[in-house]
Image (cartoon, rainbow, N blue to C red):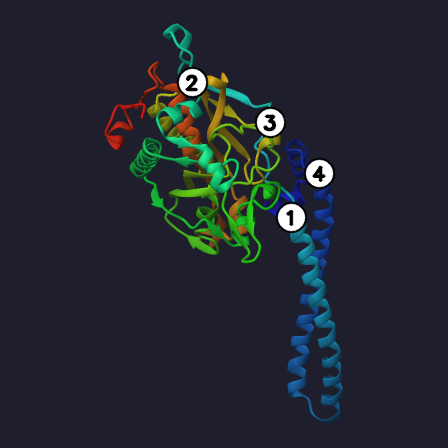
Amino acid sequence: MIDLKILRDDPERVRNSQKVRGENPAVVDQLLVADEARRAAISAFETLRAEQNVLSKSVGAAKGDEKAALLEKAKDLSARVRTAEAARGEAESTADALLLQIHNLIDPAAPIGGEEDFVVLEHVGSPRDFAKEGFEAKDHVELGKILKAIDTERGAKVSGSRFYYLTGVGALLEFALVNYAISSATKSGFTPVIPPVLVKPAAMEGTGFLGQAAENVFHLEEDDFYLVGTSEVPLAAYHMDEIVDQLPLRYAGYSSCFRREAGTYGKDTRGIIRVHQFDKVEMFTFCKQEDALEEHKRLLQWEKDFMNAMEIPYRVIDVASGDLGASAIRKFDIEAWIPTQNAYREVTSTSNCTEFQARRLNIRYRDGEATKPVATLNGTLVAIPRMIVAILENHQQMDGSVKVPAALQPFLGVDRLLPA
């Protein structure tokens, strides 16, 4: 959540942030009113409580008729205190509910607009010209069948659409990608983590995934658990309600991820680009607020290093304001070139969430005698299915084999995936 001091001191900044995100700016004024009501209710309750404390001492020292009168007064005051306490609780609940509707304050450097209004920051590598090489590129589904690496038909038979099996070299390719990612992250100072993928509502809400993103979350209602769509959620909540030290703290989480993909009917139905379940290695950082911008650049560089190692052409984009999640003030995506789609497609992203998640999750660090909220940042190192798509399609050969990037060869033990 945002700092209420910013709301009180500069509400126009908050209104503008809501507006460029495509969210309702009117909630800002509603929250200002609710915040005043909450502060008034707290003040009224505390005044009555103080009066009650003074009266309690007077009752203890009084005798006879005076004590009887004071006891009667204390009874009346106790009822007023209970009423004031209930009013305070109601006012706080109203204000808190509105505060949860305010998204993080946009970075002024972020592009303004919708999904298509991103800014391309750089291109790395050049797409292959398959026609010059004398053959037409096959898509990852066809290559997956040739290699006996991907089985979407049986995935659909067992679990429905947007599910799949990775088999043989497909499964081995996942293990190679995960091992390379974890190895790289560990060398860069990240602590590897295998987190839970079922979390309580507080963890999901605290990371901002029960607002605009709620429609894509799987909820197990009977047990009130959520299946995470990214290990960002359990990693962010790892230090919930704690005061941490020795910042920065960096974690690399490997987990399965689950997404409903609501609102994407008819999009990417072929293959494994947009699926309900996939595995991913996610980087997550807790740091001081003043270090967040530089940490964001570092996360992006680690993602670029990974892409360079995969020997795949890609571009880096600065995501526009209307396409950001509730928690992020700025996000960079890396999009890999997918030959058969003649397009760049997102394979990783990194977001700076400043103190937004930490305030919700109550994660702080000591700054002298005081405590302050930490900043949180996240970045996908590798999302397995899309990286497999990019590797198969970009490194395919005329005979249906696929060259293995040099970085993965020690983990696979071969330099080429051969037709089965």
In this rendering, the label closer to the viewer, 3 or 4: 3
Mark-to-mark CA distance, 2 and 3: 29 Å
Q: Which residue position holds label 4?
A: 25
For badge 3, the amino acid type reads Glu
Q: Position of residue 352 (x, y in %)?
A: 50, 36
Mark-to-mark CA distance, 1 and 4: 12 Å
Question: 306 or 190: which is nearer to us?
Answer: 306
Relative placement, left or right, of 402 versus 201 is left
Quarter holding the C terminus is top left
In this rendering, the label closer to the viewer, 2 or 3: 2
- Residue neighbourhood size for the residue with mark 1, other residues' Cα within 10 Å, grouped as few (<14), some (14–19), many (≥20): many
Q: Position of residue 225 (x, y in %)?
A: 52, 54
Residue name at image x 50 percent, y 24 percent: 317
- Residue neighbourhood size for the residue with mark 4, other residues' Cα within 10 Å, grouped as few (<14), some (14–19), many (≥20): many
Q: Which residue position holds label 1?
A: 99
The numbered dot on residue 408 is none
Q: Position of residue 37 (x, y in %)?
A: 73, 55
Q: Which residue position holds label 3?
A: 115
Are discs 1 and 4 less than 8 Å apart at CB?
A: no
Relative placement, left or right, of 314 versus 75 is left
The numbered dot on residue 138 is 2
Mark-to-mark CA distance, 2 and 4: 48 Å
Mark-to-mark CA distance, 2 and 1: 50 Å
Q: Earlier in the sequence, mark 2 or mark 4?
A: 4
Relative placement, left or right, of 157 versus 130 is right
In this rendering, the label closer to the viewer, 2 or 4: 2
